[in-house]
Amino acid sequence: MKLISIIFSFKNEETNLYELIKRIKSSLSVINNWKYELIFINDCSEDSSEEILIDLQKNNPITIINMTRTFGVGPCVLAGFREAKGDAIVYMDADLQDPPEIIPKLIK
């Protein structure tokens, strides 16, 4: 079985996280022979994003990396790449501007 690492850089995305995880799980449920890990890099959010992700960790393979200050997207993505264990890596914005439904096509 192969592993796909999906990396999200985020800052203040509390309104999107439940929907994002729901759509990720739905999208990946159609892929055979792949497991997944979700790596969220917190670029110093000031809302309840981290608490929401901690709650979502109970039923999802989520890793949270908290940056020590605001670094911006580039350094956050690199931090996620360093943490990733997958055979393939996908980076997506956590604000749902990138549709999770495209992941099966990327893997194919």
Image: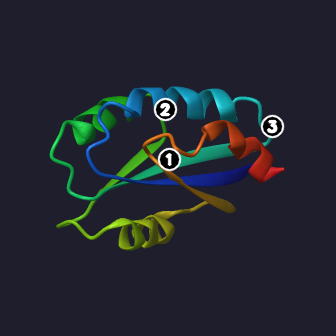
Q: Is residue 105 visible?
A: yes
The numbered dot on residue 32 is 3
Q: Position of residue 105 (x, y in %)?
A: 79, 46
Residue drawn at x 52%, y 26% is: 22
State whether residue 1 is above or below residue 72.
above
Please tell me which residue lies in front, 57 or 53.
53
Please tell me which residue lies in front, 49 or 96.
96
Circle 1 sits in a helix, a strand or a loop, which is it?
strand
Q: CA distance from mark 1 to mark 3?
A: 17 Å
Residue drawn at x 15%, y 46% is: 46
> Disc 1 marks which residue?
38
Circle 3 sits in a helix, a strand or a loop, which is it?
loop
State whether residue 6 is above or below residue 54.
below
Left or right? Give the position of 47 relative to 66.
left
Q: Is residue 58 visible?
A: no
> Disc 2 marks which residue?
21
